[in-house]
Amino acid sequence: MKDTLQKYFEKKSIYAPKDCDEVRERLQKLLGVCSAPQVAVVIPVKNEYPGIKDTLLSLSASARRVSPGHGMPVAPSPNPFHVVCVVNCHEDDDGDVKQNNLQMLSFLSTCVYESLFISALDLTSVGHYLPEKDGVGFARKAGMDYALACGADIIACMDADTLVAENYVEELVNFSHNHEKRKFALIPFRHQKAASEKLQQAINAYENYMLLHAEKLREAGTPYWAPVLGPSLVCTADGYVSCGGMNRSVSGEDFYFLQSLEKIEILAGCAKNRATSANKSIDYSPHFLNTEVYPSARISDRVLFGTGPKLRQLTEINDQQTKIECPIYPDRCYEAVKEFIEKKESCQNELAGFMNKENFLSVWNKICANNPSNPESREIAFHIWFDGLKIIRAIHATQITR
């Protein structure tokens, strides 16, 4: 782990340990009192003042509940739960956004929340803006790299409009002590109550879509089925560096990051193999923590796609309807994916065009050549190739054929 970590800092990290000496030493002094692992939560922040106060109050209330039995000091001792706020914008963002962010930086530099140790990263001032082609993915990466350089053992993702359950921090600490082979965990989510009945219908429809889509994918036999939002992701330091850190995507960074972490776990032996002639699949499920996060149910344009843009789409498309719906893909799409997973090179369904476009027969022959006598290894290699992004392409290909 030490060598891997060093290579990550040298080649991929935005921050190095030397950039965080003062903060790391302060955290280590606090941790030295209780010999606890360092847990950090990273929050990208853009145009979120004063709303972020609710998120910080929620985190503070959760952190205060952590008991001495977990190796953490009892409140009101200085519990070193590290909160990294990445205040960010682009150079061409509106002046109102920039002004709000400057207010945020001023607030974060002086605010005090019991049981929280708050760091504010400035990616919003002149000369420090986000790179032109980057977005929330870069902001998340900057915060996670900083937390890692400060010595974090566990890094949790968070959004500036999200609340947490009372046992949130306790579950993060539990995971830091008991993750074994696991490189990451997911936290179940439920959106907060929306500001209007129409918006509530939209978020209910969207949540139902996410959960039903996940269920259909799991039934199809893919390990890439779990629904994910940014605030539901938690990873170990080892898991973070093993998958190359957070990606810099403008949108969907949580999807791509989860996919990378899932591949790391599958290769590390977290999947149970069921590769027999009767059932060619692997049994894999991410680890879920026994807590919840509560993202905001609001329309926003902070990212190109995701909850905010989807809510806008649902409310605008369904403007004249009494009931808002967010239908999933037709069953035949999931059935086609299931058949492809089971039959692979002999599959003759609607995915034939997809298989040709992805040059699957060549890929499969190479997988078989590399694993001539081990069906379990072949199955794992297949699922590393047929990942979540390819499944989306396959589903879209199935729709196009009709």
Image: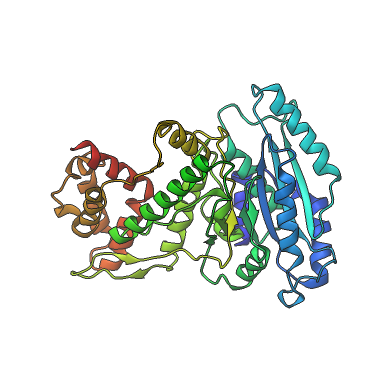
Determine the image quadrant of residue 212. bottom left
Which residue is nearer to you in this view: 300 or 148? 300
Which residue is nearer to you in this view: 33 or 205? 205
Q: Residue at x 59, y 44 (%)?
A: 12
Number of marks in the image? 0
Q: Residue at x 20, y 41 (%)?
A: 356
- Answer left or right for 401 relative to 291: left
Query: Does residue 390 lie above or below 371 as drawn?
Result: above
Q: How is the image coloured?
A: rainbow
Determine the image quadrant of residue 275. bottom left
Residue 234 locus on image (x, y percent): 58, 58
Residue 380 locus on image (x, y percent): 33, 61
| Whether residue 150 is visible | no
Residue 374 locus on image (x, y percent): 26, 68
Image quadrant in which the C terminus is located: top left
Residue 389 locus on image (x, y percent): 37, 45
- Answer left or right for 256 relative to 382: right
Image quadrant in which the N terminus is located: bottom right
| Whether residue 142 is visible | yes
Q: Residue at x 55, y 32 (%)?
A: 301
Which residue is nearer to you in this view: 57 or 343? 57
Q: Residue at x 22, y 54 (%)?
A: 335
